[in-house]
């Protein structure tokens, strides 16, 4: 089951044309990711800067379907993809940004993460806590 994050788009997130600036969509997705982790009980301060492991994003992409405007009420659905058992240090999240109560997405996004040791920066398997969280937000297998 995915995690759903409601959000109202703000003026400062728009460009001169009044449309949400393209790079802001990844910021919105990361905000939803943080909310999902927080709702699951993760200590965000520790997770994002005080632990032995870090999970930097190594790839991100966004596909835009329709413009997003200031004042739009949206929902961001965060879903993990099934983890590749041959790559225990990696995970992937997808995001669907939709108007509240509607289904066609305004945009979709993807982030790919790699778990590393914060001292030597080498890949490490995900923590058991993170693996469990990924299972709780995992989407259907294709």
Image (cartoon, helix red, strand yellow):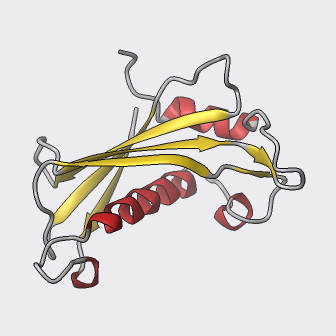
Taking 114 as reference, is 65 left or right? left
Taking 109 as reference, is 101 left or right? left
Nearest the eye: 99 or 68: 68
Q: Residue at x 40, y 27 (%)?
A: 139
Residue 129 figure quarter:
top right
Q: Residue at x 46, y 59 (%)?
A: 30
Residue sticking out furthest to the right: 119
In the figure, 120 relative to 73: above or below? Answer: above
In the figure, 17 relative to 123: above or below? Answer: below
Residue 132 at x, y percent in the picture: 63, 33
In the figure, 82 relative to 12: above or below? Answer: above
Taking 109 as reference, is 135 left or right? right
Q: Residue at x 28, y 77 (%)?
A: 13
Nearest the eye: 140 or 109: 109
Residue 9 at x, y percent in the picture: 23, 72
Residue 112 at x, y percent in the picture: 52, 41
Residue 3 figure quarter:
top left
């Amino acid at each position: 089951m995915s995690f759903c994050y409601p959000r109202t788009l703000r003026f400062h997130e728009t460009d001169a044309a009044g449309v949400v600036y393209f790079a802001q969509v990844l910021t919105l997705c990361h905000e939803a990711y943080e909310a999902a982790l927080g709702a699951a009980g993760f200590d965000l301060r520790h997770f994002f800067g005080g632990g032995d492991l870090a999970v930097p994003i190594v790839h991100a992409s966004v596909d835009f379907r329709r413009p997003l405007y200031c004042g739009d009420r949206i929902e961001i659905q965060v879903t993990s993809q099934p983890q590749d058992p041959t790559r225990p240090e990696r995970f992937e999240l997808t995001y669907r940004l939709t108007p509240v109560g509607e289904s066609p997405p305004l945009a979709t996004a993807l982030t790919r993460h790699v778990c590393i040791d914060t001292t030597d920066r080498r890949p490490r398997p995900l923590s058991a806590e993170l693996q469990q969280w990924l299972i709780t937000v995992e989407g259907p297998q294709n």
